[in-house]
Amino acid sequence: MQSEWLSLSDAAQILGVHPSTVRSWSDQGILPVHRTNGGHRRYWRGEIELWVQSQQANGLDEINLMVQNALRNVRFHISEGILTREAWYNKLDDEARELYRASGRNLMQGLINSINSSDDNVMDEAEALGYEYASRGRRYGMNSVEAANAFLFFRNSLLESMLKMYEAAAVRSPHAWSNMFRRINEFTDRILITILETYEAYTRATRG
C-alpha cells in the first residue's frame, strides 16, 4: 500500500525533477510542503497529484500563448521579405503566394489541433495538409524537394518561435511541453511523409 506521505526524494520521483528542484520549489512556496517536528520536508500525495494536474493545465495555457506568438512570428517573416529569399517562393505568382500564406495559417490551426487532441482525425488533417502542399507544388512546377522546403519553411518558423518562447518562459509544466513537442513532431512528420508519398504517386502515374 502506498504511503500518503512522501519524502523529498519520493516527491521528486513523482514530479520527474531533481530533489534539489523540489527543495527549491518548497522553499519558494511554489510546491505545497509540510515539516516534521524534526524539520524534515514531507509531502502529501494528494496535494502533489493535484499540483501536477494544475501545473499541466497552466502549461496548456502557456502553450496557447506560445501558439499566438508563433503566428505573429510567421507574419513577421513574410512582412520582412524573408520568403523572397526562398527559391521555391520565387517560382510563384501573387495568387500562388497568397495560397501558400493560407497554407501556413492552416498549418498553424493544424498544430493547435494536434496539441489539443490525439484522435485519428488529427492525423487525417495532417495527411490532407501534406496532399495540399504536394498538389500545389506540382501545379506550380516544384519538384518534391522544393515542395518539402515550402512546408518546412512554415514549420520551422513556427517551431523557432515556440522554442524561443520555451526558453524565455518560466515553464511550470515540463511534462506539458514535452507532450506538446511530441504531438507536433508526429503531426508535422505525417505532413512531410504525405508530401513525399504524393509526389511518388504522381511520378508512378506519369510513368504508367
Image (spheres, rainbow, N blue to C red):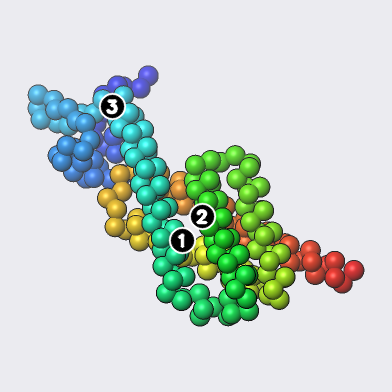
> Which of 53 and 156 lies nearest the eye of the viewer?
156
Q: Nearer the viewer, mark 3 or mark 2?
A: 2
Q: Secondary structure at mark 3?
A: helix
First in sequence, mark 1 or 2: give its number.
2
Give the residue at x 68% y 66%. Answer: 136
Name the quadrant containing residue 163: bottom left
First in sequence, mark 3 or 2: give its number.
3
Tell me if label 3 and label 1 are in contact, CB under 8 Å: no
Q: Secondary structure at mark 1?
A: helix
Amino acid on which disc 1 is placed:
Leu
User: Would you call the spot at circle 1 few (<14 residues within 10 Å), some (14-19), or many (20 or more)?
Assistant: many
Q: What residue is pinned by disc 2?
A: 108
Tell me if label 1 and label 2 are in contact, CB under 8 Å: yes
> Which of 131 and 163 lies nearest the eye of the viewer?
131
Residue 208: x and y in percent read: 90, 68
Q: What residue is pinned by disc 3?
A: 47
How many angstroms separate mark 3 from mark 2 (CA)? 36 Å
